[in-house]
Image (tube, grey):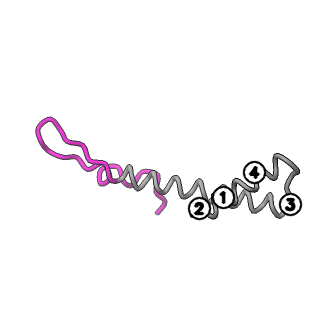
Amino acid sequence: MDEKGIQRINELYHKAQSEGLTPEEAKEQKRLRQEYIAAVRGNLRSQLDNISLLNPDGSVTDLGKRHGGMGKKN
């Protein structure tokens, strides 16, 4: 999601609070919110997949490889 999409979400939010949305604007708002949530989840998953732990014995556990398949659709 780019900055333009986030600005549009905010515009629609403020319009909904002040005067209400048309049915088309309500659909656009819902679609943009779903895109935003998908982008946040994808970013979080990417960050979590890149976490490695240093074990007390000096070995490294790559959590992305160990748990990377969790939550992903095949």
For mark 4, give the secondary structure. helix
Is 70 left or right of 39, judged from the image as shown? left
Q: Amino acid at mark 2?
A: Glu
For mark 1, give the secondary structure. helix
Marks 3,1: beta carbons within 8 A = no
Marks 2,1: beta carbons within 8 A = yes
Q: Amino acid at mark 1?
A: Gln
Of labels 4 and 3, the one closer to you: 4
Q: Which residue is mark 3?
A: 23
Instruction: Say which residue appears at 77% left-offset and 50% top-offset.
Output: 14
- Which callout, 3 or 1, points at the residue further toward the start of the chain? 1
Q: Residue furthest top?
A: 56
- Which callout, 4 or 3, points at the residue further toward the start of the chain? 4
- Which callout, 3 or 2, points at the residue further toward the start of the chain? 2
Q: CA distance from mark 2 to mark 4?
A: 15 Å
Which mark, by number, is residue 7? 1
For mark 2, give the secondary structure. helix
Q: CA distance from mark 1 to mark 4?
A: 10 Å
Q: Residue furthest left?
A: 57
Chain part drawn in magenta? 50-74
Q: Which residue is mark 4?
A: 13
**Could you classify mark 4 by the number of other residues whose Cα lies within 10 Å: few (under 14), some (14-19), or many (20 or more)?**
some
- Which callout, 2 or 4, points at the residue further toward the start of the chain? 2
**Could you classify mark 2 by the number of other residues whose Cα lies within 10 Å: few (under 14), some (14-19), or many (20 or more)?**
few
